[in-house]
Image (spheres, rainbow, N blue to C red):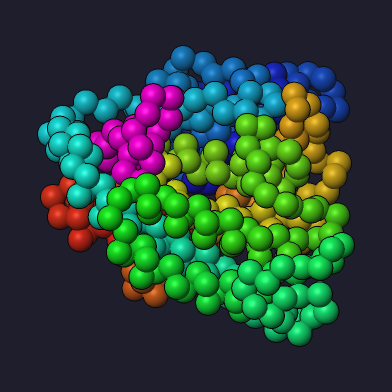
Amino acid sequence: MPTAVLNQSNVRLQLTSERLEVWGPNPDTGRDECLRQIPLHDLERLIVSEAVYITAPALAELMRRGIPIQFFTWSGQFLGNFLPAQNNHGMTRLRQYQQTLDPAFCLQIAKRLVTAKLYNQRRVLQRLAASRSDITQSDQPGTPTKPGQPAKPGQHVQPNISDALAWLDSLFGLIQASTSLDELRGYEGTATARYFQCWATFLPDEFPFERRSTRPPHNPVNACISFAATIIYNEAVAFCHAHGLDPALGTLHSTENGRWSLALDLIEPFRPAFVEPLALDLFSHQILNQSHFEYRDGGCFLNEDGRKKFFLQYERRMERQFLSEHVGHRTTLRQQLEHQAIMFKAALEDPNRFNPFRMN
């Protein structure tokens, strides 16, 4: 059990010997009893809602074992991480501060991140197109045969996947030739917009997706993408801390107050490789439906039942083993996410050692 998620309200987490016990009211009898036991030797991280009580001995043991805790509100909004103390990486952080002030270093790392993200976006579209019978979309009525050809008034246009793949291909050389971070971010933004335009066509009709919307997300698809990105982002924050890095110092994402810019950098290749495929599976396989969402505060959010189903699929996908052609052995997405922090730390001495995650 690498990850334990406690989403139930009014339960208590306490330490008993080498395990955590979840105590709360039995739904049948109403009496307080042990609902679940979690062996500590199996646990790597804990995700809890704000309505979960953690005893001081349990909290201390989690910190002693280096197990991070993520806290969410009852409505699913992220509150923060509770992390074990890290005080033995002063030289690493000093080197990181020096390097992130070097524009050449930041540009080199950012190019590698955007290249990997673009590569993964292309692989996702290739896989989706290969699994669909109407792969040659240029033959569909109402679809322009040339990139950029305008639609007729009132005409519904399906993006041409082949044209999009060719256009994405053309960006690799431009990315490598970029001379500034602003130019690089421009290519990343336009590539992502084109990618989402094609990706959205694979969603069920009852879950339309026109564009990314955040803070707040405006529909169920955006709600799932944002929630998945929030969780993996905070996993990346914990991995940065664990390996002596300051997650606030970014390269592709500029360093700003109020965000962990390095963590945002490191998850970029995982957005097309993990976040969007997870969202697509949740809707395409009817794991989630409209009853799993609630509309409030001007946005759309997963409700408690929706979060339960979401976390189960999130954890399964993160822990699923696969043979990676790029690292040459069996691994998981979570192991590769942690490996991004390890490689970035090595890149502080040699930028060529940073090779962001790529899909098979």
Magenta residues span 243-262
Q: Nearer the viewer, residue 120 or 180?
A: 180
Q: Residue at x 55, y 33 (%)?
A: 47
Residue situated in front as seen by the camera: 78 or 125: 125
Above-or-below relation of 218 to 277: above
Picture coordinates of residue 2 (x, y %)?
A: 49, 46
Main SS class of the magenta portion in the image: loop
Q: Is residue 275 visible?
A: yes
On the image, the x and y values in percent for residue 90 come to: 16, 30
Is residue 299 toward the left or the right of residue 333 in the image?
right
Q: Dividing the picture into quarters, in which one does residue 217 lie?
A: top right
On the image, the x and y values in percent for residue 140 come to 79, 80
The residue at the far top in this view is 56
Residue ID at (50%, 52%): 189
Q: Is residue 64 left or right of residue 134?
A: left
Q: Does the image show residue 334?
A: no
Residue 29 rendering spot, x and y as whole percentages: 84, 23
Does residue 216 appear left or right of residue 16 in this picture? right
Residue displayed at 46% across by 63% down = 118
Residue 276, image quadrant:
bottom right
Please report the residue visible at 31 percent of the width from the left and 59 percent of the height from the top: 178
Please say whether residue 84 is one of the residues in the magenta stretch: no
The total number of labels drawn is 0
> In terms of depth relative to the viewer, which is nearer, 216 or 59?
216
